[in-house]
Image (tube, rainbow, N blue to C red):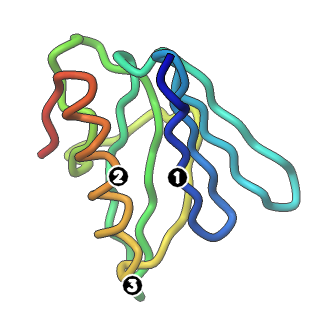
Amino acid sequence: MTEPIVFEHGRVQIRVDRGVFELFERSKVLRSYRTPLEWVKVQVQVRKRGVILLHFSYVEDLDEPIYSRLMSSVYSRSTVEITMADEPVYRAFFTELAQLSGRAID
Protein backbone atom coordinates (compact mmCIF):
# COMPACT_ATOMS: atom_id res chain seq x y z
CA MET A 1 0.00 0.00 0.00
CA THR A 2 1.35 3.42 -0.90
CA GLU A 3 1.44 6.26 1.57
CA PRO A 4 -0.88 9.23 1.11
CA ILE A 5 0.58 12.25 -0.67
CA VAL A 6 0.23 15.32 1.55
CA PHE A 7 0.85 18.91 0.48
CA GLU A 8 0.70 21.64 3.12
CA HIS A 9 1.25 25.30 2.41
CA GLY A 10 -0.04 28.05 4.69
CA ARG A 11 -3.71 27.44 5.41
CA VAL A 12 -4.09 24.81 2.68
CA GLN A 13 -3.71 21.05 3.00
CA ILE A 14 -4.16 18.69 0.06
CA ARG A 15 -4.18 14.92 0.47
CA VAL A 16 -4.28 12.22 -2.18
CA ASP A 17 -4.90 8.76 -0.83
CA ARG A 18 -5.89 5.69 -2.87
CA GLY A 19 -7.01 7.83 -5.81
CA VAL A 20 -9.08 10.29 -3.76
CA PHE A 21 -8.18 13.99 -3.83
CA GLU A 22 -9.06 16.07 -0.77
CA LEU A 23 -8.56 19.81 -0.33
CA PHE A 24 -8.86 21.51 3.05
CA GLU A 25 -8.51 25.22 3.76
CA ARG A 26 -8.51 26.80 7.20
CA SER A 27 -10.24 30.14 7.24
CA LYS A 28 -13.18 31.58 9.15
CA VAL A 29 -15.06 28.53 7.95
CA LEU A 30 -13.31 25.22 7.33
CA ARG A 31 -13.83 24.39 3.66
CA SER A 32 -13.18 21.11 1.92
CA TYR A 33 -13.46 19.54 -1.51
CA ARG A 34 -13.25 15.80 -2.18
CA THR A 35 -13.31 13.93 -5.49
CA PRO A 36 -11.53 11.16 -7.39
CA LEU A 37 -8.11 12.38 -8.57
CA GLU A 38 -9.08 11.70 -12.20
CA TRP A 39 -11.90 14.25 -11.93
CA VAL A 40 -9.93 17.16 -10.39
CA LYS A 41 -9.58 20.34 -12.38
CA VAL A 42 -7.69 23.40 -11.11
CA GLN A 43 -7.91 26.64 -13.03
CA VAL A 44 -5.55 29.51 -12.24
CA GLN A 45 -6.92 33.05 -12.35
CA VAL A 46 -4.41 35.91 -12.06
CA ARG A 47 -5.83 38.91 -10.20
CA LYS A 48 -4.44 42.34 -9.37
CA ARG A 49 -1.76 43.03 -6.78
CA GLY A 50 -0.03 39.67 -7.01
CA VAL A 51 -3.09 37.62 -6.06
CA ILE A 52 -3.97 34.34 -7.72
CA LEU A 53 -7.19 32.38 -7.33
CA LEU A 54 -7.11 28.62 -7.71
CA HIS A 55 -10.56 27.39 -8.75
CA PHE A 56 -11.16 23.70 -7.99
CA SER A 57 -13.88 21.93 -9.96
CA TYR A 58 -14.54 18.81 -12.05
CA VAL A 59 -13.36 17.92 -15.53
CA GLU A 60 -15.89 17.47 -18.30
CA ASP A 61 -13.56 15.15 -20.27
CA LEU A 62 -11.17 12.82 -18.45
CA ASP A 63 -8.25 13.88 -20.67
CA GLU A 64 -8.46 17.57 -19.67
CA PRO A 65 -5.38 19.01 -17.97
CA ILE A 66 -5.41 18.84 -14.19
CA TYR A 67 -3.95 22.39 -13.89
CA SER A 68 -4.47 25.20 -16.39
CA ARG A 69 -5.04 28.91 -16.85
CA LEU A 70 -8.59 30.17 -16.54
CA MET A 71 -9.78 31.11 -20.04
CA SER A 72 -13.43 31.92 -19.36
CA SER A 73 -15.85 32.21 -16.48
CA VAL A 74 -15.72 29.33 -14.08
CA TYR A 75 -17.97 27.49 -11.70
CA SER A 76 -15.85 26.16 -8.89
CA ARG A 77 -16.55 23.88 -5.97
CA SER A 78 -13.82 25.58 -3.95
CA THR A 79 -11.51 28.57 -4.45
CA VAL A 80 -8.19 29.18 -2.74
CA GLU A 81 -6.45 32.56 -2.80
CA ILE A 82 -2.65 32.47 -2.95
CA THR A 83 0.13 34.92 -3.76
CA MET A 84 1.87 34.99 -7.10
CA ALA A 85 5.09 33.98 -5.31
CA ASP A 86 3.40 30.77 -4.09
CA GLU A 87 2.08 29.71 -7.50
CA PRO A 88 5.25 27.79 -8.56
CA VAL A 89 4.95 25.65 -5.40
CA TYR A 90 1.37 24.70 -6.29
CA ARG A 91 2.29 24.17 -9.97
CA ALA A 92 5.07 21.77 -8.96
CA PHE A 93 2.69 19.79 -6.75
CA PHE A 94 0.05 19.53 -9.48
CA THR A 95 2.75 18.53 -11.97
CA GLU A 96 3.50 15.58 -9.68
CA LEU A 97 -0.21 14.72 -9.46
CA ALA A 98 -0.52 14.98 -13.25
CA GLN A 99 2.26 12.43 -13.66
CA LEU A 100 0.62 10.08 -11.15
CA SER A 101 -2.77 10.31 -12.82
CA GLY A 102 -1.56 10.26 -16.43
CA ARG A 103 -2.82 13.78 -17.11
CA ALA A 104 -1.24 16.99 -18.35
CA ILE A 105 -0.88 20.54 -17.07
CA ASP A 106 -1.08 23.67 -19.20
Instruction: Give x and y (percent) for residue 87.
Output: 35, 69
Q: Earlier in the sequence, mark 2 or mark 3?
A: 3
The residue under the point 69% across, 64% down is: 11
The residue under the point 27% across, 34% down is: 66
What is the CA distance from the residue labelled 2 to the residue labelled 3? Answer: 20 Å
Q: Earlier in the sequence, mark 1 or mark 3?
A: 1
Instruction: Give x and y (percent) for residue 33.
Output: 63, 31
Relative to 51, say whether 91 is above or below.
above
Relative to 54, say whether 84 is above or below.
below
Q: Are marks 1 and 2 in contact (CB under 8 Å)?
A: yes
Q: Quadrant of residue 99?
A: top left
Relative to 8, say whether 1 is above or below.
above
Please state which amino acid type lies under the numbered disc 3.
Gly
Q: Residue furthest top?
A: 61
The residue under the point 20% across, 46% down is: 71
Task: Point out which mark residue 93 bears.
Answer: 2
Q: Earlier in the sequence, mark 1 or mark 2?
A: 1
What is the CA distance from the residue labelled 1 to the residue labelled 2? Answer: 8 Å
Q: Nearer the viewer, residue 39 or 95?
A: 95
Q: Quadrant of residue 17?
A: top right
Q: Nearer the viewer, residue 78 or 13?
A: 13
Q: Residue tagged by mark 3?
A: 50
Instruction: Give x and y (percent) for residue 101.
Output: 26, 23
Q: Is residue 50 left or right of residue 6?
A: left
Q: Residue tagged by mark 1?
A: 7
Q: Residue furthest bottom?
A: 49
At numbered mark 1, what does the secondary structure look like: helix, strand or loop?
A: strand
Q: Nearer the viewer, residue 90 or 58?
A: 90
Q: Is residue 87 left or right of residue 101?
A: right
Please state which amino acid type lies under the numbered disc 2.
Phe
